[in-house]
Image (cartoon, rainbow, N blue to C red):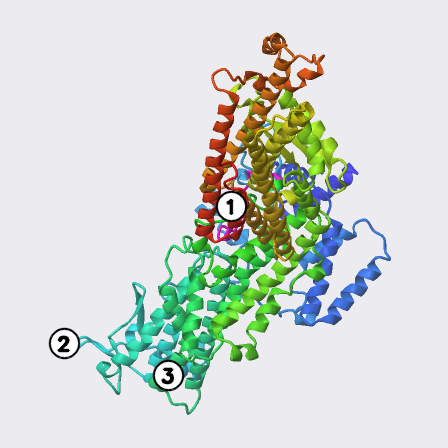
Amino acid sequence: MVFAIGELTDQLVATVAKLPSDKDSPRVQNLRRRVERALRPGPHGRVDQFAVARQLEGLQEKFEVVDRPELADALRASLAELKGYSDAWHPEILSLLLNLSDRPAHLSKIEDLPKRTSAPSQDDLPLSWSKIDANSQDAAAFNDENIWEEVDFAGESSDDDFSSIVSGASTPRDLPNLDAGLEPDYIIPDNVFMPEHGANLLISTEKAQFWRPKNKVPAPEVKVPAVQIITELQLAREIIFMLQGLPTSIFWRLDGEVVMDRSYALGHTSNQSISSLIQSFMDIGTHLDALRSFTKSTQKIPYMQTFCRGIEERLFEFDSNLSHSQVQYLSAGSTVSLLQLLDDVRQYSRHLLLLSDMLSKLDKGSDTQPMQCLDLLYDLNCMREALGDESVSISDLFFACFRTYATTIKRWMEAGHLDPQDETFFVRRNPENHDLKTIWHNWYSLDDETRPQNVPNFLEAGIRKVFIAGKSMVFLRHLNALPDVSESPRDLGLLFDDTTSHNSSLSLPFSSLVESAFDRLVDASHFTSAGILRRELDEQCGLWNSLDAFQYVYLGRDLSILGTIDAKIFELIDRGRSWDDKFLLIEAARSAFSVLPNIDSSRLMVRSSGSSFNEHQTPQRSVRLLESISIDYALPWPVANIITQDTIVSYQRISTFLLQIRRSKYAIVRQRVRETRNSREDGRYDKLIQALHHNFLWFLDSIYSHLTYYVIAISNQHFRHELANAEDVDAMIAVHKSYVSSLEEQCLLTENLSPIHEAITNLLDLSIHFADLQTVHAAEDALTGQGDATKLKALRRKRAADNDSDSDSDEELEDFDNEQMLTISFRDSSYDQQMQNVKQQYDYLAGFVANGLKSVARADGMPSWNVLADRLEWQKGWLKS
């Protein structure tokens, strides 16, 4: 094998280099060595058979594209036939054929090849060594054997000394001279680009291009500006180009305005005569340029993007109309008239000019007043309608913008969702509030600071309903009671389509159309969400059960239940025990209210401020002591959004006032029982004592019955009727607040009625003091009559030392379980004098209350005050002696 390779190498060197057959010469050995290195197996891989296949497929497609399907079929058949002959070198063979191919789609046959001349000229023959003179200096330069040696550029390198030789078989000797170019003075003739018969057309076209410098009229020697005469058609086309926003030669744009180059003039008229006409065109072009500039600005507000799109559509329509006019002017036999063109332009641009004037009123900083454009567009439509313009182009643009703007409103009303990226919406989410009891009041709010800028003026009246509808959907989403798709209102597009229909436009003015469309949109969503929420509050959330519970817990509907709690508290107070222990009070309240089916006793909670009478000696017998306790009834979070915390405080104040009245009556009634039990046969009853006792009971019963039966019961009936008819949650909250506010006022708990309430409180304390005087006097008389005054003194000292003692060995000492009563003494003032003092205080306070009620009745005209005043004065004069 090695011998065969060596023989082939010698033949290759001899054939290509054409050297003598002397194998031992240095030059032959050198060439032989270089060829062997070139033929030595290297790291080169074989031909990629898949790449060859792709090239062949591409060649078939090429034949199909160039309309040579017969070549594609022939190639496909040959490849199929070749698959029948298995050979590992097929990819290399096909790759060689592909590389040797030359325009196969055109030179598919041998006769298609260019024919060579039989005798090439002497200049066409390739240069050979024989042509070089062996004796010349050029020949001497090529005679050295070393010229064939490869230059070693890296002699110190350890890489293999590999080189290749370039033979005449791989690279042709006669390479084209790429550096040779055209002659520097060579001019390409015109007939290369255009035939001779089109020369006249080219000349006429160049002459028509009046803006070319060579077509300008040279300036005369006199210093008069040169004027270029143009035709009316040329001027009309320049005007059309200018109005379409294209650059022209006659009209320039300078500082936002269109100006004309005065060096051009019509041949049949002067510039002065058409200056007004041209100025009209330039004014229209200035306005249109302002619109085109506005459409190129970036808009962040969605409806402003719709507005820009609408202007672009109208500008495109305007440009199309001008293009049609230009086509008519260029048609054969047409007449060009600038006056007619102006009339057409004004007709085409009528609405665009109105929009341009509107944009001139728009503030540059649209971010501060995002709704100004919509308001101006609304005013423009109203003004256009007032002037009798019946076209719908501007109104369609307004409704398109309004539809885009209303999309955010509709999303809020139908899903309760806000776009956090939309800073122009008038509803704001308060992220710091997460308590479901305040979801209606504190989670969302109207942005009052920026609302005048974020709400169009013509929608201000309906914003409150929009806000309520959206909050209702948020409420329902947290209740897992979102409405079905079938319950949702109609699509937004259908509402506006009805508004913009021809029949609607004939029946209502534009402002009414907008209001009706918006009202239908708002009312549909508001009615759906409010109705579902009302149903959920009534049926699932226990609104009416909670209101009934408040009637029992705070407003004293059932005295049999409250009596058990009162007796526990009042008995502990009278015995001097710790009565304000919240655990004791909670147990008593829950035990008492557990018999009612519509009250969840586990929701009851009694709170105490811890002001026990042991710490405050003075008010221990006063009804003000009861203000330290309050009853809470925990509401479900949906109901807590209707019955707010401030109204619960009002309920607690009313409940405390009623408790104070019951406390006073408890003391009077208990004293009467004791007196009956301890009365002797001689019956020591005084007319003054009987009258005071009767009047105190009359006063307490009149006040309590007036508050519970006349005020609370009647107000509750009216409240339930209004609450059942409330249209949404806001209306329900307003009705409830009005009800509680009315109760506060009629129960004398408002600030303007505080003097009357203070007088009543003093009367309640006076009644307890009167009962204490009676009890102490009766007890001392009983003990003194038995000759046991020493025992009474000892009992005083014992009670003073230990007021928590449970010793009760002597039944006769039962009336001395109250420490305050043991402090009452008749040493400084006798019993009769203190009773006279009680009578005087009662007369003053009762008269003050009655007169105050009458004054209030005259001020506000409420008849209930006069009724109560008359009842309190019914026994006026009984105590006169």
- Crowding around mark 1 (Cα neighbors within 10 Å: few <14, some 14 to 19, many 20+) is many
The answer to whether mark 2 and mark 3 are in CB contact below 8 A is: no
Q: Is residue 471 left or right of residue 61?
A: left
Whichever of labels 3 and 1 marks the residue nearer the N terminus, that label is 3
Q: Comparing marks 3 and 1, which lies closer to the viewer?
A: 1
Instruction: Name the residue: 54% across, 45% down.
Output: 874
Residue 221's disc number: 2
What residue is drawn where x is 59% and y is 59%?
Answer: 410
Name the residue that disc number 1 marks. 869
Secondary structure of the residue carrying tag 1 is: helix
Q: Quick one: label 1 or label 2, which is nearer the N terminus? A: 2
Relative height, residue 354 to residue 592 (above, below):
below
**Residue 310 visible in the snapshot:** yes
Q: What's the magenta bit mostly, secondary-structure-wise? A: loop
In x, y percent, where is residue 357?
36, 69
Q: Is residue 283 above or below residue 96?
A: below
Q: Amino acid at mark 1?
A: Ala
Secondary structure of the residue carrying tag 3 is helix
The quadrant holding residue 264 is bottom left
Residue that sits furthest to the front in the current view? 682
Query: Which is more toward the observer, 24 or 682?
Result: 682
Residue 48 in percent (x, y) is at 73, 48
Q: Tell me: 379 left or right of 53.
A: left
Q: Is residue 18 visible?
A: no
